[in-house]
Amino acid sequence: MQTVTISQLAEFANAIYFDNSIAHIPAGWDVLDVDSVQKDGFFAEAWQNPTTHEIVIVYRGTVPSNYPTLDQDAYVATGAVAPAAIDAANFAERVAATANTNYPGYTIAVTGHSLGGYQAQAALVALDENVNNASLNPYAVVFNAPGLPQSLLGGAAASSFDALSIYSQGDVIHLAGINAAHVGPLPPVSVAAGPSILSEWSSASAAFDIGLLGGPVVALAAAAASLISDWGGPAHKMQVLSDFLATAAVGGETESYYLAHNGATSPNPNLTATSGGAFLIQDGTLGSSIITQPSTSAGITNSGVGTISSIGDLVPSSDVAAASSEFAV
């Protein structure tokens, strides 16, 4: 069961850029494994939560001072398979093997930002291809990340994977790659983090006008510099996106909840009853009905029929205030 939120996964994706990542990781998580491949600029960490029985694998993205990561970016931009994607898949399989042996009942989330999100998607594909990992219910949430080349999908449809891609409104890096595909049932989701496309071009236009004092070449260079500053800065940085998600409504949702309430489906419907007798069903099928039989120690007091709404919520036909209920579908 997923309890780690989109905002918390964003914290992981941001924390891995720090040398002391543990100081930036959400509370309650312990280090499970770490891996690096210097020639590919690859670095990843795995964390486990003994209370919620979840594992998070997080991949670090591009670090300009780490030149091999720039080489990986070149692979991504040209649509080739980046060697770091293979590193990511191998690490995920290693963590999954540990989970299957020592952490039965745990789930695995993979996440990352930019190049790290690209690697996380490759890792999810690898985990899904191994039937031994089915009980781990692997899924991905990635941020400002390019899609994968078709050759990495193993013939599967990109939409068949349990994943969610989120990008800042002015980000362009997630569009990198030739014929690239973001895995998951929904197209990448834009959120209002960082500068918008309109504000980016407005800044570039202002820079162009000022640059005209030095001639057209200077003006074009000034406009380009403005765009590059935004695209490589606040429009793409994980810190900006993480800060936004910390207070945004979407940040407080789990990946499965978001997908269920935004037109996607999940293979594991979940029905819960609150202490006040209200019912909530996630990942349900539109139009499905459920018959509820609220009961007390004295027996069944009344019954009603509810329907599942277009956003996956159960709408009961009458108010229910019983402490316990019997369900029949």
Image (cartoon, grey):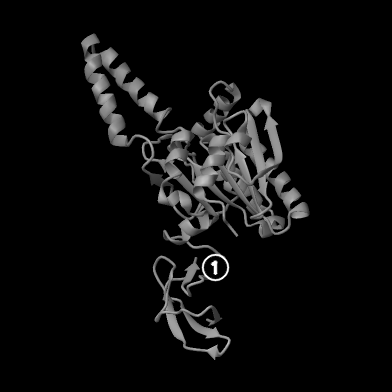
In the rendered image, the residue lying farthest to the top is 214
Side of 2 where 105 appears, left or right:
right
Q: Residue at x 44, y 44 (%)?
A: 245
- Image quarter of the N terminus: bottom right
Residue reaching furthest to the right? 101
- Compared with 156, 215 (above or below) is above
Which residue appears at 49% of the width and 39% of the height?
A: 145
In the picture shown, does residue 272 fall above or below 235?
below
Q: How many marks?
A: 1
Residue under the point 66% across and 54% down: 51
Using the image as rendered, state which of residue 284 and residue 157 is in the foreground. Answer: 284
223, above or below 180, in the image: above
Image spot of residue 197 (x, y percent): 32, 36
> Label 1 amino acid?
Asn
In the image, farthest residue toward the front: 298
- 245 or 208: which is nearer to us? 245
The x, y position of residue 251, in whole percent, is 46, 49
Q: Is residue 118 visible?
A: no
Give the residue pinned by disc 1.
270
The picture quadrant where one finds residue 234 is top left
Q: Where residue 169 sits: x, y (%)?
A: 37, 40
The one of 107 and 22 positioned closer to us in this rendering: 22
Of residues 257 and 142, the one drawn nearer to the viewer in this rendering: 257
Can see residue 244? yes
Asked which secondary structure carries label 1, the reply is strand
Q: What residue is drawn where x is 64% and y is 28%?
A: 40
| Callout 1 crowding tier (Cα within 10 Å): few <14, some 14–19, many ≥20 | few
Image coordinates for residue 265, horizontal then vertical, percent: 49, 63
